[in-house]
Amino acid sequence: MTVYVLRRLTAGLVLAVLVTMITFLLLSTTFDDVASSVLGNGATPQQVTAQKALMGLDRPVAIQYSDWLTHAVRGDLGASYFTSEPVRSALTARLGVTLSIVVVALLATSVISVALGVAAAARGGAVDRIAQGVAMVGYLVPSLLVAIALVYVLAIELHVFPATGYTDFGESPSRWASSIAIPVVALMMGGVASLTSQIRGAMIGELRKDYVRTLRTRGVPTRSIVLRHALRNAAGPALTVLSLEFIQMLGGALIIEQIFALPGFGQYAFNASLQGDVPIIMGISLFGVLLVVVVNLVVDLLNGWLNPKARTVN
């Protein structure tokens, strides 16, 4: 297992290098006039040339990337071209906001999807139709439309939740929960749909297998069969879908944060992209890749714990 973890971490680091390298190359061609943007429209060509030399942009792209990677390995992600704010501290401060809505949405998605999927597979009938209806709504209705509808009903008309803004958990847990309630619901709609369908299908397949019939003939309670045996065997594929949902939610959070004015990765990345602030964009790319690598590794380890056969395959 240790060898497997080290192998996956090594592959993740190689992936991070490749992604950041491609990102840096694309940014170097897209934002080649960033020095003039920093100085403003009134800058002379001589001033722009001097600013490029000061920022190190007059060097070959390969050397610029090598210098960035060397500093990134030591934990130094540079500073913003426009505000001189250290990228590492800025990302760390905003990471909590983004992860707060993504993690809560992921947990809520897991609980609701497992409940609906297991109930639909075990009971069938009206419960199954309700679960399939919820999944259908999640597939068909865009998250953006859900967000707008929730803001209008719950924030503007009923004044139950705030329409925009964010409150830190340490400042007020209740206000923090209120500030992320609507973004979380909007973010989890698609996840509930896909995960419920996955769990329902996997559970139906497990409940039709021979070992389930054997357990029933031995007098094992249905609740124990469903929750202790069938659900554990069906959890592997569901965990894979859940890891994909995390990645999708992380991308969706960038848009949701813009809509609800949340000071997370989304707003930061959006402003950096408009300005061509390369250090910020590179830092966000690196953080995103590392988060995906860690999540996939955790899912693989959980799969190995749930299904010992997966350990031998890995």
Image (cartoon, rainbow, N blue to C red):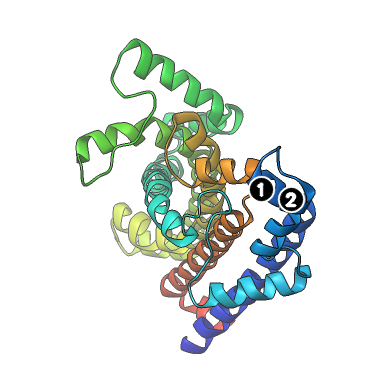
204 or 157, nearer to the observer: 157
For residue 178, say whether it is visible: yes
Q: Answer with the quarter of the image where residue 62 lies.
A: bottom right
- Look at the numbered discs 2 and 1 and tell me whether their residues touch, using CB distance below 8 Å: yes
178 or 70, nearer to the observer: 70
Residue under label 1, please give it. Answer: 276
Amino acid identity at mark 2: Phe
Vertical position of residue 199 compared to residue 151: above or below: below
Disc 1 crowd rating (10 Å Cα; few below 14, some 14-19, many 20+) is many
- Label 1 residue SS: loop
Marks 2 and 1, how far apart at CA: 6 Å
Disc 2 crowd rating (10 Å Cα; few below 14, some 14-19, many 20+) is some
Q: Residue furthest bottom?
A: 3
Residue under label 2, please give it. Answer: 31
Quarter holding the C terminus?
bottom right
Q: Residue at x 42, y 20 (%)?
A: 151
Q: Position of residue 71 (x, y in %)?
A: 55, 74
Q: Residue at x 52, y 84 (%)?
A: 6
Amino acid identity at mark 1: Gly
Q: Earlier in the sequence, mark 2 or mark 1?
A: 2
Q: Residue at x 54, y 78 (%)?
A: 9
Q: Residue furthest top?
A: 157
Taking 158 as reference, is 202 left or right? right
- Label 2 residue SS: loop
For residue 253, say whether it is visible: no
Vertical position of residue 71 compared to residue 212: above or below: below
Q: Position of residue 310 (x, y in %)?
A: 53, 76
314 or 106, nearer to the observer: 106
Taking 80 as reference, is 51 left or right? right
Taking 177 as reference, is 156 left or right? right
Q: Residue at x 38, y 63 (%)?
A: 229
Q: Position of residue 302 (x, y in %)?
A: 43, 69
